Image (cartoon, coloured by chain):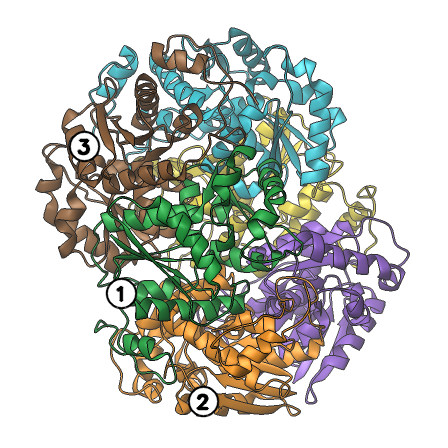
Chain colours: A purple, B yellow, C cyan, D brown, E green, F orange
Amino acid sequence: VRLLLINPNTSPGITDKLHGVAKAATASGTVLVSATAPRGVPYIATRTDAVIGAVVALEMLASHEGTFDAAIIGAFGDPGLGGARELFSVPIVGLAEAGMLSACMLGRTFSVITFSNALVPWYEECIAWHGLEKRCSSVRSLNEGFSTIEDVQHEKEQRLIDLANRVSSEDGADVVVVGGAPLSGLAETIKDQVNVPMVDCVVASVKLAEALVALKTRAPRAGTYRTPAEKASIGLDPILARKLANAGFEQ
Amino acid sequence: VRLLLINPNTSPGITDKLHGVAKAATASGTVLVSATAPRGVPYIATRTDAVIGAVVALEMLASHEGTFDAAIIGAFGDPGLGGARELFSVPIVGLAEAGMLSACMLGRTFSVITFSNALVPWYEECIAWHGLEKRCSSVRSLNEGFSTIEDVQHEKEQRLIDLANRVSSEDGADVVVVGGAPLSGLAETIKDQVNVPMVDCVVASVKLAEALVALKTRAPRAGTYRTPAEKASIGLDPILARKLANAGFEQ
Amino acid sequence: VRLLLINPNTSPGITDKLHGVAKAATASGTVLVSATAPRGVPYIATRTDAVIGAVVALEMLASHEGTFDAAIIGAFGDPGLGGARELFSVPIVGLAEAGMLSACMLGRTFSVITFSNALVPWYEECIAWHGLEKRCSSVRSLNEGFSTIEDVQHEKEQRLIDLANRVSSEDGADVVVVGGAPLSGLAETIKDQVNVPMVDCVVASVKLAEALVALKTRAPRAGTYRTPAEKASIGLDPILARKLANAGFEQ
Amino acid sequence: VRLLLINPNTSPGITDKLHGVAKAATASGTVLVSATAPRGVPYIATRTDAVIGAVVALEMLASHEGTFDAAIIGAFGDPGLGGARELFSVPIVGLAEAGMLSACMLGRTFSVITFSNALVPWYEECIAWHGLEKRCSSVRSLNEGFSTIEDVQHEKEQRLIDLANRVSSEDGADVVVVGGAPLSGLAETIKDQVNVPMVDCVVASVKLAEALVALKTRAPRAGTYRTPAEKASIGLDPILARKLANAGFEQ
Amino acid sequence: VRLLLINPNTSPGITDKLHGVAKAATASGTVLVSATAPRGVPYIATRTDAVIGAVVALEMLASHEGTFDAAIIGAFGDPGLGGARELFSVPIVGLAEAGMLSACMLGRTFSVITFSNALVPWYEECIAWHGLEKRCSSVRSLNEGFSTIEDVQHEKEQRLIDLANRVSSEDGADVVVVGGAPLSGLAETIKDQVNVPMVDCVVASVKLAEALVALKTRAPRAGTYRTPAEKASIGLDPILARKLANAGFEQ
Amino acid sequence: VRLLLINPNTSPGITDKLHGVAKAATASGTVLVSATAPRGVPYIATRTDAVIGAVVALEMLASHEGTFDAAIIGAFGDPGLGGARELFSVPIVGLAEAGMLSACMLGRTFSVITFSNALVPWYEECIAWHGLEKRCSSVRSLNEGFSTIEDVQHEKEQRLIDLANRVSSEDGADVVVVGGAPLSGLAETIKDQVNVPMVDCVVASVKLAEALVALKTRAPRAGTYRTPAEKASIGLDPILARKLANAGFEQ
C-alpha cells in the first residue's frame, strides 16, 4: 500500500510529527510518503482557514495523483475531505474521521480535547458533518496561550492530562480523542495517566486507510461521491485546474 | 445601505441575472453593487467547487472591504459564509440561507428545487449546516442536460413548474425554494402555475440583508464568530492574506 | 406596505412600547398601525395564556381584515401564528420567529433571555414548534419579582446585561435574542455592554414582514397552510365566527 | 374514580359515541360523566380550530372543577392539554396521547389513520409536541368527502380497513392508532380485518386516566406544570376567568 | 385479568417487594402471580446482566405460557421485552417502559433516579431503545455503596429524596421516575418531600398491563412483532427451545 | 495479533465462510482462530435470537479468554457487543459495526442489504444502538424463501445485485453494506455489477480489529465500559459464571 499523508498546514514541523507517528503504525507492506502544504496557513484553526486548507489539500492530492493507493488528510477537521472523495477514486481518510470512528468502537461516547479554543467551532462543525453528534459527549480545549505549535504538546502535557480526565468525569466520555495534528503522539505518552482509552488520530488514520484499501472497493458510478463532470476554471492552481478539467464524465 | 452582491461564479451572465432581480427588491435607501468572481469555476456545483468558491468569496469580500454595509454571497449553497462571518463585522447573508429562512415564515416545510442533480449533495449539506433539516421536505432536481447556464430557466420553465407542483403533492412541501443563482427571477415568473408559495432567494437575501442592517447589532467579541487572531500565510491571494494578517486580536 | 402590529396582551403600555420600536424600524413606504387586545390577559406567560392569546390574536386579525398587507403577532411565543397563517392570505410574522430567524443569520447558536421564569416552558415549546432546537443554546430568565410589566426592562437592565453575557460565556450562545414584548428596545440600549450581538424581536419582525411582502408570494392552494373549509361555530366572537364561516373552499 | 370526559367539539353525537366506548372500558369503581362543548366548532380540524377548542376545553374543565378525579380531553389532537395540566391538579389525559402511548407498548412504530386530510397537519404537530416522532411511522387519511361526521366511520369502514393495512405494508407501522373522536369504537369493529394491532384512543384514555389516578401522585410544586401565578383578565368566560384569578400562588 | 409479574433477578426479596406494591395496584378483577428467576444474577445492573436477564425472562415467560393474560417484566431496563413481544401474543410490559410512559402524561420531561451508578449506562440505552430521549431530562444515581439490595430504599431514603429534588431543580425534570425494582414502593413513601410528581414503575406497569388487556387487540400478523418462524436450537433451556420450535408459522 | 472470530450461530458452515474471508484479509502478523457456537440457534434472525446469541457470544469469549488480543463477534447485529466490552479488556468488534463504520468513510450514506426480511427489525435496532441512523439510507432485504443458509448467497446472487443497485438508485445510498454472515464474500464477487462501493463486513471487521490493537489503548477505569463489579450468579454457563465472579473490582 502506497500511503500519502498530506499536511494541509504549511508547518514542516507538524509534518514531521505526523510522519513519525504514522510511520510507526504502518503495516509491513505499507510505504508512507508525507508532504507539507506549499501554501496556506501555518496551522488551520478557523472556518476561514478550513476552506483555504481544503483547497490546498485538493491541490496537494492532485499534484501527487497516481503515486498513492490511499491518502490521509492530516488536519483534524478534515479540510477538503468531501471534495477529495469526489475527485479521487482511491480511499481518502481524514484525521478527525479516523479518530472518531475508532473511538466509536471503544466506547459509547467520545470527547475531543484540543489545545486552543480557536479550534472548537470548526471541530464541532466537523463532527456534525460526519453525523456523529450523538456519539460525541463534548469538545473541550485549553483556554490559554502557548509558545510554539510544534512544542505545544510537551508544554501543556499535564494540562491536557487533566482535561482528558475531566471530560471523562464531567462529560461522561467513554473515550478521549486527541484533536489537532500538533498533538500527534500525545495519546501514547499520557495514556497511563488518563482513566479512559485515548485515541491517537494519526495511528487511527493509517490503520483505517489500510483497512479501506483491503476492502478493494470499486469507485462509485452513482451516489453523491461519483466523479463530477469535467469543468473549466479560471485562475486556479494549474494542476488542480487540469484535474477538474478531466475529472470524469457526467452520469 | 450599501449592499454588495458577490457572485462567486465566474459567469458574468449570472451576475447580471442576480443583479437585476436584486435591484428590483432593494429598499429606497439601498445602493446595490454586484461583482463577478475573477477566478474560480463558471458554476459551483460540487463539494469541490464549493470550497474553491468559498475561498474566492472571501477574496472578493476582502477586496471590497470598506465599501459595503452588508453583503450577499450569491450562490445557493452559501460558499464561504462561515468564514465570511468570522472575517467581516458587517452582516453577510447567503442565498440559500435567505431563501430557506424566508420559507420558514411561509409554511411548515419547504422543498428546494433546482435544475441539475449535480447540485443536490452540496445543497443537502448546506441545509444540514444551517440546522434546517426538520423544516426541509426534500431537495429535488431535474435530471437531464441543458443548453446554457444563463438560459436554463427559460429552457426548463415548464419542467420546473411541474417539479414545483410535484414537491408539493408528493413530498408535502408547504413552500418551494428555487435553488441556484441561474434560476433567479423564476419564482415570480411561474408562481401562478404553482400551488404553493415560491421563494426567490435573491429577493429574500436583499431583504434579509437590509433587515440585519436595521438590527444595528455590534460585532461579536465572543462566540464562534468572534474575529480570529491575526495569522500569517503563504501563497494566498494578497488581499485575503493581508486581511488574515490583520484580522483582529485574539480574545 | 400597510403593516398591522397586534398586541395580544391587554396592556396598552406594552402596545406603546412595541409601536415605538417598530415605527423606528419601518421602511419609508411602510404605514404601521398597532392594536391592543380588547380581551384576554395583561401579559401572556403560560401555556394557558398562550391558547387564550392565540384566539384573541385571531379575533384581532379578523377584525382588521382588509386593512393590512402584513401583520405581526406582538408576543414572543407567537400565539395563534399557525391558525393565522391558515385563515389569512397575507404574510404574518411572530415576534419569536422573527427574532430567532434573524439570530440564525448572526451566529451559529442563539440563546433567548427573558425577565420571568414563568415564560420559559412556553418559550421552549415555541422554539420546538419552529424546529429551531438545534440552533438554540438555551432559554434563560431572571428568577425574581419585578414592579410593573411596563417598567421591567429598566428596573432589571443590569441584571439582564449580566444574563446576556452569561448565556454567551456559559451556554456558548453566539447571539442573544431578547424575549418578551415588555423588553422591546432593550437590545439597542444595552448592546455595547454585551459581548455578542443582541436581537430586538420587534425590529426583526418589522423587517421580516416587509421582506415577505417583497417576495410577492401567492396564497397557498395546497400544503398545510391552504385555506380551511368554511365552518359553522357557536358562541365565538362574531367577527371570527364570520371569518370561519367564509374562510374558503375545501381542496 | 370520578372520570370526566369532555368533548371540546359542539357535536352531541360525537359525545354520545365517546361516552359509549368509554363507558364500556371503565373499571368497576369508575363513574364516568361526559360533556359536550357549549361553544366552539362542530368538529376540530385545523390549527385554528385547535386553539379555539383549547380554550373551550379549559372552560369546560373549569366549570366542572371539583367534580372529577381525572379528566379526558376527547379530541385527538389534545387541544388545551398543556394548559389543563397547569391549571388543574388532577390527572388529565388527551385522546391522542393515550392512544399513542398505548401503541408504544404494542409495537416499535405506530401510524395514525383518520378520515379527512384536513386533520393531518394538526395531528402531526400534536405528535411532535408529545416528542413521539421517532415512534410514528406515518399519519395518513382518506382524501375524499363524507356525509356526516357522526356516520363517517360506517360510511368509510372498508376504506379505513384498507388504509390501516396500507400503513402496515407501506409505512412499516407495527400498530395502527385510529385518530379522531368520530372514529371511536372503529378499532374493535374492524380489528380482525387488519394485520396489525389497532388502538382505540377512547379505551386507551379511560385506562390511562385510571392508571394515573392509581399512581396517587402529588401536584407539582416545581417544574413546567406547577400552578401558575394568579392572573387578572378581561372578557374571558367568567368561570375560566375566576379560575385564572385564583389559580394558585407563584413559586 | 390473569397478570404475571416475573422478576428476572434471582433475589426472592425483590420479588416480594414487587409483588406487594403490584398487588395493591391491581383492579378488582385482576389476579396477580409473581415469579422469581430460577437462574441468572441477583440483581441486573450491566449490559452483560441485561442480556442474561433477557434470556431468563423469556424462559420464565415460556414456562408460564397459557397461565397469563398479560405479563410484566419486573426489572427497570426491560430485559427481553423485544423478544417477549415476538414470542408471546398477550400484552407484555416492562417496568421502565410503564414508568416512563406514565411520566409522559404527568410532565413534559422526566428524570430517572436510582441507587447505583452501575445501572446508568444500561438505563440510558433502555431509554434510547424506547425512543424517549427527548422526554428524558436526566438519569442520575447515588454514587456510593449500600448494605443490601433488599434494604437499599430505606437505607438511602433521605439521599434519594435529595436526588429527586435535585433532578427537579438542576435538570428541569417535571416528573421523577424511580428506577430499579429494589426501590418499588419508595415513590409513595417519599412523595410529600419531593417537589414534583413521583412515578412508581410497579404501579404503572400493573395499570398499563391492565390497559393493554382492555384494548383487546389482536396479535400482529405483520410488523416487526409478528410471530417469528419456528426455529431449531441446541443447548437452550428446554421449555424455551420448545417455544422457539413452535413459535409460529408466519413468514 | 491473535485474532479470535466467534460465530455466535451454531452453523459450522457459516464459520467456514467467515473464516475464509477473514483469513484472506489478515495482515501478515495476524493469527486468526475461529469458533462456532456450541449452543444457540443455527442463524440469529430475531430480537429473541439476538439475546440468546448475545449470551452465547459472551460464553464463547469467556471460554477463549487469554488466547486472543482482539475478537470479532461474527454476526451482523453484533449480539453481546456491549456486554463483551464490559467484560473483556481487549478490543472487540462487531460485524455490523465494522461494516457500517467503514462505509462511513466511503460515502455520505450507506444502505444495508440482506437476504431475509426476518432480519430487518433487529438490524434497524442495531443501527440505532450504534447511533448511525443519520448515515443509514435504508435497510432492505429480499422477501422470499431460500434453500439453505450456507448457499443463500449463490442462490440469490442476481437478486442481491439488483437490490444493491436499487438502494443506490431509489434510496440514495452512497455505499452498500452487505449484512448477514451468510453473505460474507459476496461483496467481492458482485462489486463490478453494482454502481456504488460494496462493503464486506468480515474484511472490515478484521482490519478494524487490527486497527484497534494498533491503537494500544488502555482498558477503561471509568466510563460506561469500565469493568463491572464481581457478581455471583446461579445456573449460568460455568465459565461465564466464573468470569462474572471475578470480572473486576472497579466502581
Instruction: Give the residue at mark 1.
Output: E226
Amino acid beneath label 1: Arg
Q: Which residue is mark 3?
A: D19
Point out residue D12 in the picture as x, y percentages from the top left corner: 16, 25
| Left or right: C242 in relation to D58 | left
Give how far across and how far down residue E73 sits, in percent. Answer: 39, 59
Q: Nearer the viewer, mark 2 or mark 1?
A: 1
- Asked whether, in this view, residue A195 is left or right of residue E17, the answer is right
Mark 2 and 1 residues: CB-CB less than 8 Å, in contact?
no
Residue D102 x/y as whole percent: 32, 47
Above or below for C13 versus F210: above
Q: Residues within 10 Å of mark 3 (few under 14, many from 20)?
A: many
**Frontmost residue, A232 versus B62:** B62
Viewport quadrant of the N terminus of chain F = bottom right
Which residue is labeled 2 in the image?
F15
Residue at 21% of width from left, 55% of height from top? D166
Q: Classify the position of the C terminus of chain F by image quarter.
A: bottom right
Task: Nearest to the eye among marks 2 and 3: give it.
Answer: 3
Mark 1 neighbour class, 10 Å CA radius: few under 14, some 14 to 19, many 20 or more: many
